[in-house]
Amino acid sequence: MNAPAPALVASRPERLRLVGQRRQMLAVMHQRLMFGMLVYAGIIALIALRILWLAAFGDHAGRKEELTSFVPERGDIVDRDGQPLARTIDSWTIAVHPNKVIGDKLALARKLAALMPEKTEEQYFALLRSGKSFVYLRRLASPALVEKVNAIGEPGLAIQREPDRLYPQMSLAAHVIGFTDIDGHGAAGAERAFDDYLSDPKTRGTPLVLSISSKVQQALQAELQGALEHFSAIGAAGVVMDVHTGEVLAMTSLPAFNPNVPGQGTPDQMFNRATLGVFELGSTFKPFTLAMAMDSGTVSGPGQMFNCPEVLPAYGQVVHDTHPFGRQCSVAEIMMESSNIGMAQMADQLGTARQKAWLKKMGFLDRVEIELKERGRPLTPGSRWGPFETMTIGFGQGIAVAPLQLAMGYATLFDDGIYHPPTILKVGPGHPLKPGRRVFSADTSYRMRSLLRLVVMKGTGRKADAPGYRVGGKTGTAQKVIDGRYSQTVNVTSFAGVFPMDDPRYVVVVMLDEPKATPETYGFTTAGWNVAPVVSKTISRIAPMLGVTPDMNREPNMSEVLPFIHNPKQDSKKD
Amino acid sequence: MSTRSFGSLFMVASCAAAALGCYLVSLRVASERASLETVEARIVRTQREVRMLQTEIGTRGRLSQLERWNAGAFELSAPQADQILKGGFELARLIRPQREVDFQAPVVLAAAPAPQRPPIGALGDDDSSTTSLTPSGLLHEASLKTETREVPAQSAGQMPLPAESKSADRPAAAAKPAPLKSTDEPGLAAAQSSKPLKKHASTASARPAKKSVDKPVVARAKAVTKRIELAKTDPLAPLPERHSGTTKDSPSGR
């Protein structure tokens, strides 16, 4: 028993040591376990928090608004009634990756040539063997063709959808709407002018509302196209404008192009004659001269008399008339018969400085104020603007403006003399009417009504009358400048009409470039024969759409002008 | 003891259950959200398709195409000024019936002549004259001519006599003008009847003393329908009697 005793004694410290070690080990193990547990707990807590976070603020939470509303790649353009004029739709595109074709290339080339015959088998085969990575075969493919190409089953063929700009009304108002380039950016018209609005993701969801009314536009364009073909003119332009707001309801330039395939349009078709083209518009300028003279006080009213000889020599030149009076004539007669001689005298009395000031005030010396980028700069005599030029400008020669500018001038004259810049955006809550500026006095504006109505009732514009709609207006036949000289045979004819004249609401300006004479016009190429009927037909069509009620019993106050018309037949009867 | 020792376990279990419940709720919400999103995606897809179809319809029915049909195929033109009416009144004017003179129509007089009666004093004496003079009889004869007036005339004829005495103080009824009906066209026929009218007038003026000549009629008529309107039978009544009525009257009156 002794033996174990020392062993016991000897083992005691060992044991003690062992116990101490074990304790230490246990403590370490506890620590490690605890640490591991904490790590796991931390990871789980992280995951749980992440899940909670995702549940609360994850992808689901914020995407609803985007999903519920459909935002096109590029904003729509609609007319004032909401009819789409330009839209972006998905179109099918067929392309090929020649280096990824795995089937028989010759057989594929044959099939492609059968489906898309614009290229021959050899061309397709050469294309497939070229080793290029990507070639377009057809853009804007029809669904039927896409189906057939898909049925070939070649993995190297790529059939994709990509956004494409479509103009459902084709060439209707093509110059106003414009078109986009291959990258989808506006290249002309409203597409170019409002490119930022149409491509900005924030705004492109709401369509751009133009002031154009497609029905009015169609009526104007169809009537003008008919006249263009009938009189073999090289071009035409037309504008319908709201007198009170300056909204352009229709604006056309012919020949037109198809904005769906702008590449096919010729430069002549692309040219916007209504805003970019400037023309000497002739006698349609005369009402402005008269209004200026009446407002300045140099002409007292329609009854003032002028000496109207057969020819008027002035400043070393001679002014002629198409229907010379050869007697004393009243202002009303000068307007009615569109006498250059009478108007030249009025402009002469007005003077160059005042004429310039008036034209500046009316906006005829600057580019036309409109949102479109295609704006022409008016042509004026510039430094040569002397007394004789003042006379010629008085009857519309020597100053070239865009047809839209002419419409703007008439709108100013008949909106109680207040100028509103023309706009192609619909005036409404999103685009309020800007305050205008007064150009003519309201009294002058009122007195011009009966004078212009007289022109259509008894004067040169008789063919422009649309019964019941009280059309007033002025014809204009200007000789074209060819090789620096006024041609005696080639004309630009125009008509500026306003209706209803007893309470003016709309302006119609129509212009034909180089119309030819026909048997019905008895060889004449003057405005009264070719553009005036266009105005009559257009107004008969558009007035009911615009809410103008025909009334055979209403007229402006004609008693202001009728007493000043010399009527030899009536006078002889009286005698 | 046991509950206390299991207390922590219960706590853990309930916590776990609560956590699970919360998780289930959030799972449910997530699944609802996902289905909602699917619906939204479908809506957007449908919108896109609707847009596509609208565009296609718009392109096919574009205004230049319509113009080609309207101007070319149908040859339509803008309405003339006189084809546009300003409102209901002008529209109503268009459907105004054509006025034609109907020569066959019976002649209607604006005012009724006074039938002749013997003086009140002679009423009891001469029975035959009174019977022939009773307006009911006259009315009956008259209504034989105009079919439209037959019913009130007959009813008036069948009326009992006692009302006669009461009606004595209503002289204005006979003078009430009868409203003209569409069949009663005053025209040439009226001109033809001017002669008998004068005759009646002369007879009426010949006996101004008899005030109540036409009153019985009114009284009876009133008794039929209890409406003043029945007076319109009155002026019409003597009118066809131009032939029959006057002949009956003539023996007693003249």
Image (tube, rainbow, N blue to C red):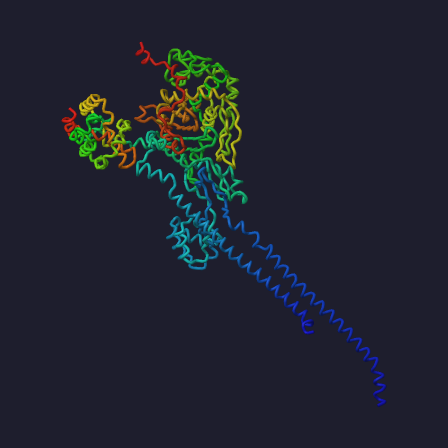
| Location of the N terminus of chain A (image quadrant) | bottom right
Q: Position of residue A297 (x, y in %)?
A: 49, 15
Q: As rendered, which of A358 and B182 lies closer to the eye?
A: B182
Res B187 seen here? no
Q: Residue at x 82, y 78 (%)?
A: A16
Q: Position of residue A209 (x, y in %)?
A: 48, 38
| Location of the C terminus of chain A (image quadrant) | top left
Q: Position of residue A545 (x, y in %)?
A: 39, 34
Q: Position of residue A161 (x, y in %)?
A: 46, 51
Q: Seen in the image, is B67 located left or right of residue A418?
A: left
Q: As rendered, which of A337 and A471 lies closer to the eye?
A: A471
Res A570 seen here? yes
The quarter holding residue B139 reads: top left
The quarter holding residue A128 reads: bottom left
How many numbered marks does the figure carry? 0
Q: As rendered, which of B19 and A127 lies closer to the eye?
A: B19
Q: Seen in the image, is B113 located left or right of residue A338?
A: left
The quarter holding residue B199 reads: top left
